[in-house]
Image: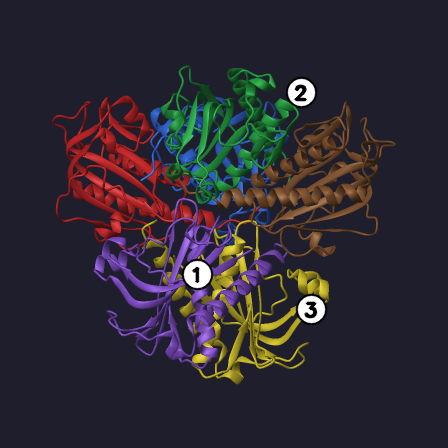
Chain colours: A brown, B green, C blue, D red, E yellow, F purple
Amino acid sequence: MNFNYSLLSTPLDYDGSQLRELFPKSMGAPAGHAAIAFIGSCQVDLDHLVDSDDAHSGRPIYSPSMLHLILEFFGMNLWETVLLQRMLMVKASELLLQKGAEVTRSGDDIYMAHRKLSVSIATASRVSTLVHVGFNLDTAGTPVPTVALSELGFTAETFAVLLLDSFKSELECMWHARCKVWGV
Amino acid sequence: MNFNYSLLSTPLDYDGSQLRELFPKSMGAPAGHAAIAFIGSCQVDLDHLVDSDDAHSGRPIYSPSMLHLILEFFGMNLWETVLLQRMLMVKASELLLQKGAEVTRSGDDIYMAHRKLSVSIATASRVSTLVHVGFNLDTAGTPVPTVALSELGFTAETFAVLLLDSFKSELECMWHARCKVWGV
Amino acid sequence: MNFNYSLLSTPLDYDGSQLRELFPKSMGAPAGHAAIAFIGSCQVDLDHLVDSDDAHSGRPIYSPSMLHLILEFFGMNLWETVLLQRMLMVKASELLLQKGAEVTRSGDDIYMAHRKLSVSIATASRVSTLVHVGFNLDTAGTPVPTVALSELGFTAETFAVLLLDSFKSELECMWHARCKVWGV
Amino acid sequence: MNFNYSLLSTPLDYDGSQLRELFPKSMGAPAGHAAIAFIGSCQVDLDHLVDSDDAHSGRPIYSPSMLHLILEFFGMNLWETVLLQRMLMVKASELLLQKGAEVTRSGDDIYMAHRKLSVSIATASRVSTLVHVGFNLDTAGTPVPTVALSELGFTAETFAVLLLDSFKSELECMWHARCKVWGV
Amino acid sequence: MNFNYSLLSTPLDYDGSQLRELFPKSMGAPAGHAAIAFIGSCQVDLDHLVDSDDAHSGRPIYSPSMLHLILEFFGMNLWETVLLQRMLMVKASELLLQKGAEVTRSGDDIYMAHRKLSVSIATASRVSTLVHVGFNLDTAGTPVPTVALSELGFTAETFAVLLLDSFKSELECMWHARCKVWGV
Amino acid sequence: MNFNYSLLSTPLDYDGSQLRELFPKSMGAPAGHAAIAFIGSCQVDLDHLVDSDDAHSGRPIYSPSMLHLILEFFGMNLWETVLLQRMLMVKASELLLQKGAEVTRSGDDIYMAHRKLSVSIATASRVSTLVHVGFNLDTAGTPVPTVALSELGFTAETFAVLLLDSFKSELECMWHARCKVWGV
């Protein structure tokens, strides 16, 4: 299972509209399962939310600066994509724990004590499925108590590369597990 | 997404033949996505292995006593099942870390330093998919260095209940994540 | 297979726009396979029809008052959803026959002699599949001869509860049938 | 959606082994979704049952003479096949009711008061899915109270043709319903 | 596997908006897997392109006159549809070679030496998948060197009928191949 | 989409039993979509045939020497696999035509005039799908008139490498086509 990623060298603010078909490819990622990483603010208004829980509760998303990852998968249904999203957050959590940060994962959120590190959502387009994850780089003005990646010992770029490399390895390992067994 | 489990009150040795269609139901678990937990030795000869890596390398599986879990899913393909198996091992790993055991997960294996705690496999039958996980309860005579669940602070029954409860919660949480979003 | 439903306590007119992603959840139904029932007029203009047969024939839909059901399924394809829609109409038909009403089902329509009781459609959104069924409560001004639920001995609320309960039971029974067999 | 069927002109006893890949084709039905109908005794021993409920309860199946239908579908999963099986039993029930027989359908069984008319099962092979339905033609020696098709006013051949024709029409009608809608 | 097609008797210009749900049915093709063929210019502006390679490279599509085919499939995923699109181009290529035209196929394009005969794309709607193929009938003003169907010895109508008939036969032959085998 | 292949350096006779789960991997091909190529006789008795047409017609398969390809795909259904098998035969046919051999493809068979070059079948296992293709290297004693690859200008090894390389490229090209489009 091929999975590739690119890091944008220039900042890009996230307002929810980037969670669309072929966004990673349009920003330079190769065609096929891929991710694009970039840095920018995060401001998703109520009417651009795809999370109905947040929308119904009137919880817009805001962070002055985040490391953003947008992943796109092809030929995966939304259930498989939620499972992959969850695994991505597990990998992020493992990286942080290895660095000594006492984080906990709850569903697709990562917390440091009661401070929230990340936001994440998975959804489907007409031709693909998509995941957005944002990790706080700055916490000023966030609507809930938050923690920044830098407090946990990582720069955005290092964390992006480590996370996407380890996710890619886990994907390959899981695909190997799927292809190595006889049936019963 | 319903998921139920039962614990067998009597021991049962695992020789690989239990990894078959409707085994959990035949042992008293309800129909539908389910797991059955039991305690017994683990001895899978080369010709009963479903893992072709192990079979081609001539690595039979042996443990004098294990906590065994057999999970069965319906209408899930093998890829989804491998993703769920991986999540089950993540949950096991999280439980052990919370208890203070310094374990690491590598793919679907859990280790304490270089000692192996578990074996696991996922495969497909004609009507379902199946996962087996075994956690060592005794380490005498195992072909590789192993660690037992008791050394990590858990009895088999407590661990089985905690693990299957937390897996069930994660399943429900992931299904909720799949059903709460608008598309893009 | 979980399936839950809610009844709206206030009237709501149906104009076709309610047949959209997460409408049942947005009106208070739980996340996951669910239905929402409500009472209101039914007026779907030609450009809001999703049935191309009706649209191409220039047949708008109108009823002064209907019991409306909107069902949403997740991870079901449109073929499965049409099969479930058909089964829902079978259950409605069975309920009416048990009450002594001499109805007949033809596809996804229910008739009393040549008077039409219901309208129904199944379609797909980007993240789910949806079914709308409307049962006439009043027949004044309908474009074809119609019959009302009250003429057949049911109040809207009683019928909604009986129908959705029996559909839920049939769903569970069918899922049990899917999960109880060995392959061949 | 093509669906074709053939009627065997010579009797054939059913012992469960006929529920196998390509049985209809091997008896002369065309390749593709198809059914084969034949008349013969029905005797399925415990170790040939594919219904785990029956097997675990020790309920073998016996009837001295039945009208048997074996349907095979390709590219349908087992859930879709259970839905189609259920619809087949609905059609059988509708035919009998139209003839004036006061039958009731409960799941995939048809009853006349407390006498059972039919047995049915759906399962999966490696390349297809299969449905067996048997309708009693003789009731001598059956393990539960039964009713025969002849008591309900049908000969085996007439019933087979009417049922398979009406099922074929319903299939086509449902496929049309799946292919006529715009998405939302 | 049913597949039907219609030929429009009046010209229709293609601007990309015809590649939409139920377009063949709306133009008179039967419901279900189907194709519609028509003659008209081809002009797809950058903002109506569904091919991101063309859009990112700023390559609009233009031909003064083309034979257009729009195929729609139901219950096929986009991968299956790309495979069918590729087979359609193989069939076109085989017809041309049989006529003595020295064409070559490269992916889903057909060339005569370095002159391009065709354009093609496959995509997904919310309820179906769609393929567009255009074969040049006139080459004046095309942005790349092109060849017309007439230079290769075919009128538009003859070619459309031969191609869609042979594609229909290949479809039936492939479906037969899928339904004739025992598993292993 | 990754696809890899290996060529066996020692001969291996094909009797049908090689068409089984993980055969390519067990002979040294990497895990995942893969092919293994080898040279050996081909003798498949009636009771090892998976082609029910051949079995019902009593047509065993025999060739004194063939180039054999066994391909295995994971997570592809049988319909997708038949489409890929067909494409593989198209690629073989294109290679032969480029070499000047006047072959024709009919379904999944390749002929030189009325002499048959190849046999092929696609089927499903419990965990994968499989394709076998055999190209005659020697024609002595074959049950129907045959032609050998050497008569068409190819050695077995050269042809295997050219064919599998070009199939791999076509696969990648088709996967690119699936992943480059916006929906409609």
Contact check, label 2 and label 1, Cβ < 8 Å: no
- Alpha-carbon distance for marks 3 and 1? 48 Å
Q: Which mark is residue B100?
A: 2
Give the distance between the C-alpha atoms of the residues marked 3 and 2, in whole angstroms: 62 Å
Judge whether residue C21 can be spotted in this image: no
Give the amino acid type for the residue marked by disc 1 in the picture: Leu
Label 2 amino acid?
Gly
Task: Kindly check if marks 3 and 1 are in contact, taking CB atoms under 8 A apart as contact.
Answer: no
Residue matched to label 3:
E60
Residue located 44% across and 61% down the image: F8
Give the side of residue D77 with respect to residue A93, left or right.
Answer: left
In the image, residue C25 sits, relative to residue C129, either above or below, namely: above
Q: Which residue is mark 1?
A: F8
Query: Under tag 1, what secondary structure?
Result: loop
Viewer-side residue, E108 vs D94: E108
Residue D46 is drawn in which quadrant?
top left
Indicate which label's residue lies in the foreground, 3 or 1: 1
Chain letter of the residue beneath label 2 in the structure image: B
Q: Residue at x 37, y 55 (%)?
A: E178
